[in-house]
Amino acid sequence: MEAMKITGGNPLKGKIRAQGAKNATTKLLVASLLSDKPCRFYNVPNIVEIEVTVAMCQEIGMQVAWDKEAKVMEVVTKELNTSYIPQRFSGANRIPILMIGALLGRTDQDIIVPVAGGDLIGKRPIDFHLDSLRKLGATIEFREMKRQGAYFAQAHNGLKGTVIHLPYPSVGATENTILAAVTARGVTEIKNAAMEPEIVDLILFLQKLGANITLDVDRTIRIHGTRRFYEVEHSIIPDRIESASWAMAAIATKGEIFIEDAKHQDMITFLNKLREIGGGYSVKKDGIKFYYDGPLQGGLHLETDVHPGFMTDWQQPFVVLLTQATGSSVVHETVYENRFGYTDILKEMGADITLFKQCLGGKDCRFASQSFPHSLIVKGATPLACKDIHVPDLRAGFAYVMAALIAEGTSTITGLPFLDRGYEALDQKLIDLGAMIDRVEIDQRPEEYVYPQMTKPMQSVALGV
Ligand code: EPU
């Protein structure tokens, strides 16, 4: 098992380049399965999440050529070998369920996908996905199969466009419905759709692929079905979660990081909250500089929300930042019911955090009548002490890295596969920015979770783009 040993105290200083967005790239790869045309992607992040998704797509017939150095990936799926996503991908990430939307229009065979995984941050049901796909004409059943069971989906009579009203603007359900609607007959209207920048990126890609899609300001997405597709070249948007993570690490360590390509437009809410607590930033023509601009002031009220609200994935590192701000701040998590589990460790490190089941801050969310601890008050500033930490999920993992960077002493962080899933070259970037870190093998124990590997070789793809 590997560990990262981090000795706190050094300000992070230097320049990094924003990676391509994890949560856009995976969906674009799946979307490319809609057609048999080649697609070329630029700015592809070299992270485990992409390796897992590529392995899944190769399984069903995608040819892939990936120049990791140049961050360019070329893919084509001339025909499907199978529409069975093996059980080993169960639990790997949230992508298998999206295969249903992408493949329904491409095969008459059963599409078999394992149960969805991803981070352990709540129940993460898929009822909105299933309801929407069924409304479009799919038949989907859950059947026992091997260890965990799988979803069996097909649309023998084809899919037909309709009006779908999502109960909540779920990112995944919006994506799945869009993917299925692209090859459905007629027009599909998704109301109360998510409109995250990663979804807009998917829409841009699909438009190039041949789809006719509109996105209205009232959260309505309208898709005219088509089967006529084109070759695509697409540059993936910068990862706004990764950029914000490094921004917060810069400020928490009293340092300064210039993030080349960080995209202002996708970080508006984050920048507002950062400025409210006194964090420094300066938007340049080719990126954003983040810097410590004197002591941080708490007294903040922060509520996570769907876009254009404050992202739930910015929440964990922001709470670490708030432990370094003077005064009490309130954080209300309204996207996931169970995304504060990571605060126990921060408390053991010295943070003053209290959890509440009520909705703090004045507005009731959909968890108001349930008994989840989804609000917190954090009082600062408190010094943090080093600790041995096992990472439970991706974003909590980065929050712990940040905590270790400001803590006194050396922390040992394990569970690194979770971090490798979403942060490109994390340890190298930390070293380049001046952190005192070492990635070492600490014992012979296997990793608790091993992500499915790419088993098929990369192939050259004859692209006309
Ligand atoms: N929900 C349902 N039923 C559904 C779908 C969602 O109740 O059928 C609920 C979820 O339980 C959750 C809320 O709706 O409480 C939002 O879930 P959503 O579907 O929007 O999230 P997701 O598509 O599963 C993506 C990102 C997450 C990010 C969320 C919110 C990917 C692969 N994951 O998840 O990213 O937090 O949107 O923006 O795109 C991460 O990158 O670390 C990560 C967790």
Image (cartoon, grey):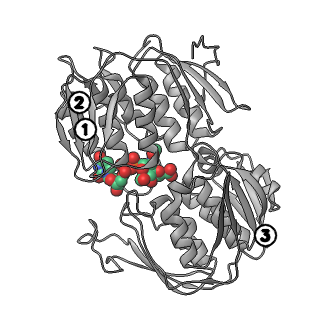
Q: In this view, does 332 lie to the left or right of 392?
A: left
Where residue 365 sits, quadrant-wise, is bottom left
The answer to whether the residue labelled 1 contacts the one labelled 2, judged by CB atoms less than 8 Å apart, is yes
* Between 26 and 415, the one nearer to me in the picture: 26
Q: Which mark is residue 130?
A: 1
* Between 233 and 339, the one nearer to me in the picture: 233
The amino acid sitting under disc 3 is Pro
Q: Label 1: few (<14), some or many (≥20) within 10 Å? A: many
Circle 3 is placed at which residue position? 11
The answer to whether the residue labelled 3 contacts the one labelled 1, judged by CB atoms less than 8 Å apart, is no
The answer for how far apart the CA atoms under marks 1 and 2 are is 7 Å
Q: Which of marks 1 and 2 is nearer the N terminus?
A: 1
Circle 2 is placed at which residue position? 140
Task: Tell me the mark number nearer the camera, choosing from 3 and 1.
Answer: 3
- Where is residue 31? Give x, y as percent: 43, 28
Q: In this view, does 225 lie to the left or right of 286?
A: left
Task: Tell me the mark number nearer the camera, choosing from 3 and 2.
Answer: 3
Q: In this view, does 368 lie to the left or right of 269?
A: left
Residue at left offset 65%, top offset 63%: 247
The answer for how far apart the CA atoms under marks 3 and 1 are is 47 Å
Q: Label 3: few (<14), some or many (≥20) within 10 Å? A: many
The amino acid sitting under disc 2 is Ile
Residue at left offset 27%, top offset 73%: 364
Q: Which mark is residue 437?
A: none
Q: Earlier in the sequence, mark 3 or mark 1?
A: 3
